[in-house]
Amino acid sequence: MNFDLTPEQDQLRDAVRALGRRYGHPYFVAKAKSGEHTTELWHEAGRLGYLGVNIPTEYGGGGGGITELALVCEELAAAGCPLLLLVVSPAIAATVINKHGTEEQRKKYLPGLADGSQKIVFAITEPDAGSNFHRLGTVARRDGDDWLLTGRKVYISGVDEADHVLVVARTEDASSGKLKPALFIVPTDAPGLEKSKLDMEILSPENQFQLFLDDVRLPADALVGESLDAGLPALFAGLNPERITVAAMGAGTGRYAVEKASEYTATRKVWGGRSIGSHQGVSHPLAHAAVQVELARLMIYKAASLYDAGRDLEAGVSGNMAKYAAGEAAALAVDTAVQALGGAGMTTEYGVATLLGAVRAGRIAPVSREMILNFVAQHVLGQDKSY
């Protein structure tokens, strides 16, 4: 059992860390508060090859796996720049297209995803379906050789930054009459597709949207894969990378918060000559948070290594556990950091309270902690399905 990164992974981690620190959390906050996007960081990361580390070399990527992409997500977050669209575009969309798209789709989309020149976001969540994708109401129906999509999606990240959105819809199986999932690559400027920005209490340069699809007409080649049979495996192909990279981003955020608080408490002196960090009431909560973050990191890279080894079922269990652990650890770390800094913790200057909304959301999305506990109870503990 080896817990060491390869030399190449070590080099990647160090290089991404240097890039993230060059921009830093003040850059991230300034972009979010001005309503702008982290365009400069995204394009530089793409130019340096960090956005495409998990994409095959023949399509312009680095030829690595989700382990490498998790390193990118974690290190940028640890520098105070947690980029949500790393999860959406390289982790979900690129994985789905690479594993289940046609060769034409791979050639068309993967090079742009690898170099950052284009983004594809992901639309599965619906107002009435919640976590139950079996109840999705967005329907795709044939109209000659074309497809027509109708439905609604909600909490869709980064639509205003993307060229395309990967939409999960339901189609009717002609042989059985049953509905089955299918994925479609939809231009964000397609006629009939309307977006409405959602006001969120999260400080982030990435916006959330509700989408309305009203008979959006798509050509036959917008369907991911060679046939409708690709729909279900394509959908599940993106879920483990999503959970692993979200967890990596959470762990990085937790590291950032603990580091900021540790620097402050080691030098802040208000009771004589001793730092406030010398008091166990301050240092122990920070140490506890650091332990939880490190435990989450171990599960993240276990899940990533299992996924890259093709052990999907085991990666599913570990990926869900990693997402749960990292969500809890990140929320704990940021809250503990705010408390350790006292009033300074609530200021923009010290850069920890600016992450409260994001880490709280990490306990809900992309899958809630309760649904993960349901999954573990059923698939690990052998309990009856509770929903």
Image: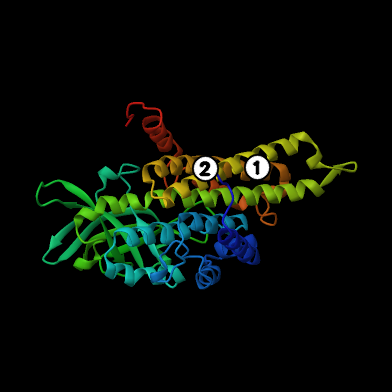
The picture places residue 62, in percent across and down from the top left corner, at 47, 66
For the C terminus, the image quarter is top left
For the N terminus, the image quarter is top right
Residue 244 vs residue 169, the one in the foreground = 244
Render colour scheme: rainbow
- Dot 2 falls on a residue whose secondary structure is helix
User: Tag 1 or tag 2, which sits nearer the N-term?
Assistant: 1
- Dot 1 falls on a residue whose secondary structure is helix
Q: Which residue is mark 1?
A: 290
Mark 2 and mark 1 in contact? Answer it, CB < 8 Å.
Answer: no
Q: Amino acid at mark 1?
A: Ala
| Residue drawn at x 43%, y 52% as measured from the top left | 308
| Residue drawn at x 39%, y 46% as measured from the top left | 311
Q: Amino acid at mark 2?
A: Met
| Residue drawn at x 23%, y 62% as measured from the top left | 223
Residue 106 vs residue 86, the one in the foreground = 106
Left or right: residue 50 versus residue 289 is: left
Q: Residue furthest left?
A: 175
The picture places residue 366, in percent across and down from the top left corner, at 42, 47
The label nearer to you, 2 versus 1, is: 2
Q: Which residue is mark 2?
A: 299
What's the CA distance linking mark 2 and mark 1? 15 Å
Query: Is 348 situated above or below 342?
Result: below
Residue 261 vs residue 226, the one in the foreground = 226
Left or right: residue 11 versus residue 310 is: right
Left or right: residue 366 versus residue 355 is: left
The picture places residue 139, in percent across and down from the top left corner, at 21, 54
Q: Residue furthest top?
A: 383
Mark 2, other Cα within 10 Å: few <14 / some 14–19 / many ≥20: many
